[in-house]
Amino acid sequence: MSTPFFIQSFVDTGLGNSAYLIGSHETKKGILIDPLRDVDRYLHAASELGLTLTHVLDTHLHADFISGNREIASQTNAIIGASAEGHIEFEHIPLTEDSIIDLGAFQIHVMTTPGHTPEHISFLLVEPNGRTPSALFSGGALIVGGAARTDLLSPETTLPLASHLYHTIHDKLLKLPDEVDVFPTHGAGSFCVAPSSPERTTTIGRERLTNTLAQPQSEEEFIKRALTGLPNYPTYYKYMRELNQKGARILGGVPILKPYSPSEARSLMDDGVVVVDIRHQKKFAAGHISNSYGIRVDAPLIVWAGWVIPFGSRILLLGESATQMEDAARQLIRIGYDDLLGYVEGGIEAWAKEYPVETVQSMDASGLRDRLNEVTVIDVRRLSEWDEGHIPGAIHFEGGRIAWEDLTFPKDKTLVIQCASGNRSMVAISVLKRRGIHNVIQAEGGINQWKARGFEVEKDRIQTIP
């Protein structure tokens, strides 16, 4: 027998997150959970399905993106629902464990599930009889193979939240039947989680068997596991919670970008506007505007902009097509980079007719091996990647840290910046040049090319900048 409801997921691989549309073909009513800020795709899907959105719900105050709840509410009659403990400052219904949203074809029951955040709630989809649970929309309380991290608010709250997470999982979520489907918001690719499975959905039964955090264990053992292996996370995170609490500006859609001539763009740059070059790194290397950020649109821009561009910056884009720049605009508004003035009309070709361009030299793996004693190799990959093997004598400095930490590595030699393949190293090079360091070369093809040529890697030498 078919279920009286359906679930459609919307995955953003850049953020590693999923939003969910729950609807009924019979009642034509739907609910949206944890949407991103560019909401046109959700509205289009609802329209295509003939659904009226009655509610837009958030599991928690997100640290990694601006919620699309107010955008949805401004364009529909949907009611915003969020945790009563979130103390949200705009119109919404505060949700507690007594809250039930009944749409006839299904009910949504609220579970308080603190841990990832203090106010975190999850949504249990229950059959029309009001008793049989079918699906859990768990936010970050339970994900495939783990749970979302508890250290994003402050060092003081990390341990207490990890304790709450233990009780959320073991005293609440694991009490649900094994057959309940689990639809997390966070997943692989999100910095809100430690490394986890690439799969996006699961079941209570599967997590009971395979999730290390769901195994029988003491609270102390759980906390140790939950806080092990957590990577650094982008600097923009510190602004998201408050913005989601106060309510970010309603944009009404993806901004329409205004064209600026090269001379206008240069004048804006003199006034503090930053240029973000979203082309492929090889095109950036061949010629770019001085002091521009080189972050290709599929880097993904949404992650690297949040690492290296100061929050609140006024931004001009430099790209190659309207589609590319719309994609960039979408990514930027998702994380609160709203001050998008426009783009450089005519791209780098138009700029080069009026002003100088800069270039970035590269060195292939064979050339690097021959000159290894003459240069300083800076490996900008994640620590977990570094630990798996690195170029002998290299120094580790994660790319996301290069924009805002003291650069304590030696600069008396030419710096060869290396990542896995060349994407992240070019971001790092563009930031180093903005910081006045110009004796930089890109390791062409990164460590992938180095390994492909059979050159030595080492694992035991520790040269990581603390």
Image (cartoon, rainbow, N blue to C red):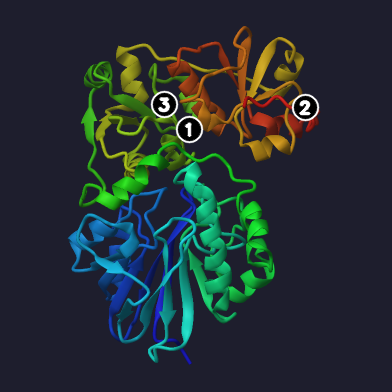
Q: Nearer the viewer, residue 120 or 360?
A: 120
Residue 22, x across and y down, in percent: 37, 74
Name the mark nearer the viewer: 1 or 2: 2
Q: Is residue 406 visible?
A: yes
**For mark 2, what is the residue?**
461
In the rendered structure, which amino acid carries the disc numbered 1? His
Left or right: residue 228 versus residue 18 is: right
| Marks 2, 3: nearer the viewer | 2
Report which quarter residue 85 is drawn in. Answer: bottom left
CA gap, disc 2 and disc 3 = 32 Å
Q: Nearer the viewer, residue 18 or 263?
A: 18
- Classify 455 as above or below 8: above
Q: Which residue is mark 3?
A: 293
- Where does the image place residue 134, in percent across and percent down from the top left? 48, 81
Q: Amino acid at mark 3?
A: Tyr
Q: Nearer the viewer, mark 3 or mark 1?
A: 3
Judged from this view, the residue extending furthest toward the top is: 412
Which of the 4 image quadrants contains residue 101? Answer: bottom left
According to the picture, the residue beneath numbered tag 1 turns out to be: 280
> In the figure, is residue 309 to the left or right of 158?
left
Q: Are marks 1 and 2 in contact (CB under 8 Å)?
A: no
Who's the residue at 54% across and 18% down the image?
407
Residue at 48 percent of width and 32 percent of height:
280
